[in-house]
Image: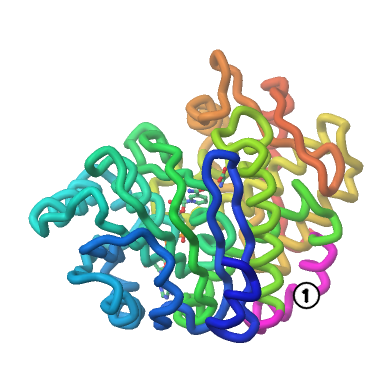
Amino acid sequence: MTTETAQTLHPGTQTVTVDTGRERYDIVIGHGLLALPQCWAGLPRAAQAVVVSNATIAPLWAARLVQALQPHYCQVTVIELPDGEAHKDWPALNAIFDHLLTHGADRKTVLFALGGGVVGDITGFAAGCYMRGVPFVQVPTTLLAQVDSSVGGKTAINHALGKNMIGLFYQPQCVVCDLDTLQTLPQREFIAGLAEVIKYGPIADEGFLGWIEHHLDDLLAREPGALAHAIRRSCEIKAQVVGQDEKEGGLRAILNFGHTFGHAIESGLGYGQWLHGEAVGCGMRMATDLSVRLGLLPPEALQRMHQLLVRAGLPVRAPDLGADCYLQWMGRDKKAEAGEVRFVVLQAMGRAAVQGAPDEVVRQVLQAAVRVDALA
Ligand code: NAD
Ligand code: GLY
């Protein structure tokens, strides 16, 4: 869908294209999209659509989507999963398969993931497996999902021994970001999503980092213009990276800035204690500190990241799980090679790389992170 076509849906609607070489699809960003039947017209023909959502989001947003899908499908059903990261698991995945099989879903049935990253990741995984692959559409309803998880085809469920350990690369037919859905998002979730917006600055675009610093108050107030710009620029950067390295052979790993430390926080505390974006925010501070300690960045860069994260309302002091516990969880990171943990580090603000780090330097980062003073 071109931006001109998108404008016919609603003025101000924008598109960003993801092109992996194998597949090409659009991210459509705008207001009021969910309820527009025209928005869903270009999808593969099918008799059935299944909206996968959860018990929190479905009562708020599913009815509009179902109504807009009805002109295009003979049957539209909704499955409500239990809410929460703890349910990104086998029982919830099986509940989707049970629903599809009991409703006679065939190979052409289109799945719509209406929700945040949890719903998007599990629906994408279900779509990739059901009858060896059925089409699916991402309809992200959190800021985090609109700028990150709905784009790029990473799908997964968690395992008790690690986050996102069981999954597939499986690209959606399209991503529809209806900015209106963010109106009902709790502020804590919104701020967690900002962490993934902030991430794109240090890894790929210092100018965007400066823009975020300048417009942070507008973003926190969910000013529509600022929000639309932040989401579009984040999606553009993600689309560029995924277009060059769909399956994370190398470059794509930079999107995991802060995630090696962040996943250890999430897993070490138990899913759901800290939100994913909160853990990533704190992890980005730790990864910046690591970059400084490795001599890649000047200390001012850490101060800059620290101040931005604090202003955004993200946690900067890491939970005291003990360095050994952190190292154990980080050893299970998917970027680890032959047992060596690999970190996304900054070579400059706006440029990231992936490399190992001496254990004693990582321990220094961990020890400093549990003593961080937010006011420093
Ligand atoms: P989430 O999906 O748990 O959603 C956060 C909370 O907000 C939930 O309680 C949800 O029910 C609620 N919610 C969602 N939309 C709402 C709305 N519009 N109004 C009111 N409430 C709403 O969390 P998330 O932060 O969106 O996603 C985190 C997940 O995404 C993690 O599992 C993480 O691993 C995954 N992730 C995946 C990728 C990827 O590339 N696939 C990237 C980043 C994160
Ligand atoms: N969120 C990291 C990635 O999509 O690769």
Q: Tag 1: Cα neighbours inside 10 Å, few (<14), some, or many (≥20)?
A: some
* Viewer-side residue, 206 vs 173: 173
Left or right of 312 in this view: 119: left
Give the quadrant of the N terminus: bottom right
Q: Which quadrant of the figure has residue 353?
A: top right
Asked which secondary structure carries label 1, the reply is helix
Ligand 1 lies in which image quarter? bottom left
Residue 69: x %, y % from top left: 31, 75
**Residue 151 percent across, percent down from the top left:** 53, 53
* Front-most of residues 132 and 125: 132
Kindly identify the residue that appears in the image at 38 percent across and 37 percent down. Answer: 167
Residue 328 lies, in percent from the top left, at 50, 26
> Residue at the location (64% across, 51% down)?
239
Q: Is residue 12 left or right of residue 180?
A: right
Magenta run includes residue 257? no
Q: In which quadrant is the C terminus drawn?
A: bottom right
Q: Image quarter for residue 291?
A: top right
- Left or right: 26, with 374 as reference point: left
Q: What residue is at 63 percent from the left and 36 percent from the top?
A: 245
